[in-house]
Image (cartoon, coloured by chain):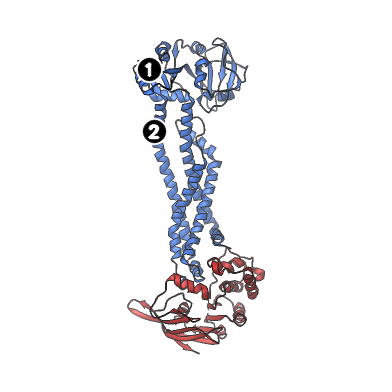
Chain colours: A red, B blue
Amino acid sequence: MDTFITAQNLTKIYTRGAEKIYALNGATFSIARGAIVSVVGASGSGKTTLVNVLGCLDNPASGTLTVNGRQIFAGKLKLSETELTKIRREIFGYVFQKFFLLPTLTVKENILLPSVFQPRLRASGDRLAEILQLLGIAHRKDHLPGQLSGGEMQRVAIARALINNPSVLIADEPTGNLDSKRSEEIKSLLLDLNQKQNLTIILVTHNPELAKIGNQILELKDGTIQES
Amino acid sequence: MNIFQVAYKNLWRRKTRTLFTLIGIALSTWVLVTLLGFNKGYEQSLNENIEGMGFQIVLTAKGCPYEAATLMLKGGTGLRYMPEALVRDVAQKTEVAAAAEMLMHAEFDPNKGESGGTIVYLGIDPATYSPMKPYLQFAQGDWFASAAAGEVVLGYEAAELEQREVGDLMLLPGSTQEYKVSGILKRTGTQDDGMIFLPLQAAQKVFDKAGLLTMLGLRLKPEADQTVFEEELYQLPDVQVVSMAQVKNTILSLVASAKVIVLSIAFIAFLIAMFGVLNTVLMSVFERFQEIGILKSMGALPQNVFQMILIETTLLCALGSLAGISFALGFSSLSETAIRQLLPFTPNGRLIIIGWPVIIFSFVSITLVGIVGGVYPSLRAAAIRPLDSIRSEE
């Protein structure tokens, strides 16, 4: 598998009064295309900071990040919010613990939401049908989020993240709000997506069972990565 | 799906709040449209009333000029009289194109309306009076045949109120003689609608005012200088000279003071609409802090979010102002009745005229003011960083 993401010496520092806290302290690793990467660690270890930097939601203090051969961060150069957004919309799809579905939009409309803001990437009807089929929610396409179960809502959130064909899916605690049965369903779905779509998945989780699907595990401790 | 559909659906997430905001905007628009319509309607009706009199100058017995003006516009009690001989020479002057002598008499009728009212009788000579008012047309019959014919002509409203037809007989106050209705005028929208006309000599006899007049209406030749002529008339003793242009200007200057109040209320209506919108949209943005951040993580640029919130605001204002305009149009008769109850003097005709300019101005201005109120919340929304919303999730 070819390398898709390369991170070198990524550093992120938060200050609390006079104290400096290294949320990331020289993180260096690479991720292959089509890999499932589980990011694990105790609360406050820097997992979310890492995926925020990897997912271009935040600038690192220093270090280099290259995605698909394109250098995103280099040295201390900061990108503006708009520049970060433009990178995000081309490369990444996000899934969060809370589903953040718009309650007044149907399943179909929620999935198409990213396309509203990216007319150039506007998803076709075929793509929508494909995603609905893939996620097993075609029969729910005209329902409102309030009429769905937690598992179905997370499927819709995943469908929304995938509608514009991102290269990388970042899922932050995707099963955090689900019971064990629904968590199992989402786990299977992520594996399926990875195998069928060759989708690179970066998964932040406290759930050891879910973390096991990763073929690469990045364990964070005090901002430092211990790769296994 | 497009950004307009998303914005529209967002509005209905908090139905009650949106509804109350819409009502607030609608009420502000209703007030604005009604006030602007009143502004136009009052002035137009007053102009029509004064121009409908057909006179440029009116001579009355010496007294309060405002009372004289009210007398001419509305008819009324407390009438003063002047001798015919005093003003007859005026009608002969070279500047005068036409002159109409009139004797007015007002009589309280306890049976008129719900709590009684005043019936106004006007003694005239049709030969001089009707050329002054070329718009007068008969619905039935014609003017009285002669001064001695024992006939009367009823204005449109007077005929409605008295329930009279041509050929009916009626008694005049203080007289035992029955007068035949020789004609009923069509509606004019002027004070003539409420009058009962009778021959001048008959009026002087019936009301015991032999040789007296209430008014002399004058129309001047086009080449006459009205100001110079008025100056000449001012020299006449015991005669009040009332220029209709002056009456109009006097009333309009009084109305101008009311206009300032009207415009102040309209301005307050603007402010209510703007702050209502600002409050609603800002609350909505705060409530959707995380969601807006998530939209940005999905690829929405700050300008996309700004646009979405501003579209929500625009939709809210446009819907609210359309509802307000509908209320103003639908309830204009009710508003007019209320205004007539409140104001001491209102001209005949429509008091509230809501034309397209008023509708378009109100719609555009309320919508624009609302949009201005939505700019700040939109900017706040556009500035939300996805990272902050994700952190707030933890």
Residue situated in front as seen by the camera: A147 or A26: A26
Quarter containing the N terminus of chain B: bottom right
Residue occupying image coordinates x 55% and y 57%: B15
Earlier-in-chain disc, 2 versus 1: 1
Q: As drawn, is B142 to the left or to the right of A220?
A: right
Please provide percent x and percent y for residue A31: 51, 85
Please provide percent x and percent y for residue B296: 49, 69
The amino acid on which the numbered mark 2 sits, given as a three-letter code, is Ser
Q: Which residue is tagged 1?
A: B239
Q: Which residue is tagged 2?
A: B253
B334 relative to A70, above or below: above
The chain under label 2 reads B
Q: Quadrant of residue B220?
A: top left
Circle 1: element type: strand
Residue occupying image coordinates x 49% and y 42%: B358
Can residue B387 be seen from the camera position used here?
Answer: no
Residue occupying image coordinates x 51% and y 19%: B131
Circle 2: element type: helix
